[in-house]
Image: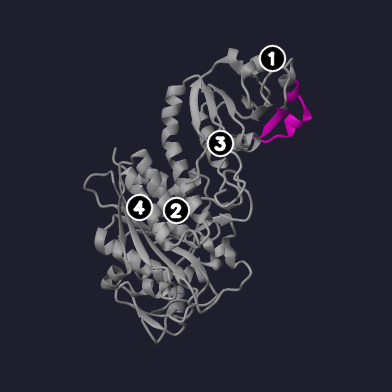
Amino acid sequence: MTELRKITFDAVNLPALPDATGHIAVFVTPDGKLSIGARRLNRLTKGAVARAVESERWEKLKTGDVLSLSFPVGLAAEALDLVRLDRRPSVAEARKAGAALARMAGSAGILVLCESQSRAAEVGFGLALRGYAFTDHRTDKGELPEPAVLACSNPDSVAAEAAALMAVAQGVAFTRDLVNEPANVLTTVEFAARLEGLRDLGVEVEVLEEDRLAELGMNALLAVGQGSVTPSKVVVMRWNGGGDEAPLALVGKGVVFDTGGISLKAAAGMESMTMDMGGAGVVAGTMRALALRGAKANVVGLVGLVENMPDAAAMRPGDVVTSMKGDTIEIINTDAEGRLVLSDVMWYAQETYKPSAMIDLATLTGACIVALGHENAAIYSNDDALCAGLLKAAEAEQEGAWRMPMGGAYADLIKTPMADVKNSGGRPAGSITATEFLRRFVKDETPWIHIDIAGVAHVPRDLVLSTKGATGWGVMTLNRLVAERFERD
């Protein structure tokens, strides 16, 4: 797993500033008021800090931005970073500031004079997440980032607050690693092996192999993988921190590579289909985060791991398969495979664990990207209260999410005289008809959310807390939802 920058918390030691190496960062309010530490740095640099915050460049900065002074006189440091931030910023502003410092520092060590900054832990969280870099397959992997030290007036209390955040950062990094891996490395076998590693954190892990899946009647899932030499699997991860309460079930689509099958995708862009296991990656990262912070909740994560290949044994358009539930499905398009995987795993989750609620995540449809771009995940639900809780959590974590409609008219688009349902309703409302397909496999008594993360799991540009590529979208949101709605006091 990618090693995040080590972040520690220490007391403020102003006399040591002249000898600190790497980067030194200090917060300055937008109106230019200097803290005790900033005033000390101003004296050491013969007024450079005051001149900088009186400059036109400073005035043009937005909250959370950084003005960097290279090789400042009077300091051994290679740079002095001035961060424009209120003493009581929002969580998003503090994380943005931390992320900006990570970009400025690169792999160099950094001393951040947080002093009495109220959001110091969130600054550290942004610093950790934005410093992530996936370099496993480069010959020149670069240098591991040097540690960051956050100097605070109350280091012990800040460190305690930051502990849970750093657990979430580890979960996000785990998800990013999984989504970034190429498919020749992250096979279904390797994916399952990495999930088995969660046992070291106290997570119960069970791997269901193809013979067991056949016994259970998971023929929809098995149909997707029957054209691949890599075996299909279902991995179940259980975190039992909530006593005897029914668990929250998290279900993830884990298509480690998606060619489209016989309904072959266009060659251009197919290389990005290594990320088609993004839903499973988010479930895995969330389970890691919950275990690392010792969440007082019962959560079961289930992922269906398959590869969709155009082999002679592959399923064909026109085939009819029978799901674990017993519903028959006409295969219209073999590239509409993720819903087949989810249908069986969702049914198994409900039959086996009787969850208090169920949330599935999948890079399910290109139609979701057409509708919402790379700004928001598409949210569908049969339960207003649960959905409101998730949207509130997503907003708090600054992870874009937008609720979408469902209804009988959309369900009508996947009717067929050949079977109980068909797996594709065509181009119109493609993300919604995919959801209506999944809805058939949700029991009436189960509060449920479907999240289509096709546009947000892997993005073509840098974001505030992540670089181009895998984002880890959803780990922070699901962790907060668990904390706010499913944890015991």
| Residue 203 magenta | no
* Label 2, residues with CA under 10 Å away: few <14, some 14-19, many ≥20: many
- Identify the amino acid type marked 3: Leu
**Residue 65 as seen in the image, left or right of residue 203:** right
Residue at the image point whose x is 36% and y is 71% from the top: 440
- Identify the amino acid type marked 2: Val
Q: CA distance from mark 2 to mark 4?
A: 16 Å
Q: Earlier in the sequence, mark 2 or mark 1?
A: 1
Q: Position of residue 132 (x, y in %)?
A: 55, 43
Q: Earlier in the sequence, mark 3 or mark 4?
A: 3
- Identify the amino acid type marked 1: Leu
* Label 4, residues with CA under 10 Å away: few <14, some 14-19, many ≥20: some
Q: Earlier in the sequence, mark 3 or mark 2?
A: 3
Which labelled disc corresponds to residue 44? Answer: 1
- Nearest the eye: 458 or 427: 458
Identify the magenta region: 51-69
Q: Report whether residue 35 is seen.
A: no
Task: Classify 316 as above or below 383.
Answer: below
Give the farthest residue toward the left: 244
The residue that disc 3 covers is: 127
The residue that disc 4 covers is: 196
Q: CA distance from mark 1 to mark 4?
A: 53 Å
| Residue 60 magenta | yes
Is label 2 or label 4 in front? 4
Q: CA distance from mark 3 to mark 2?
A: 21 Å
Q: Earlier in the sequence, mark 2 or mark 4?
A: 4
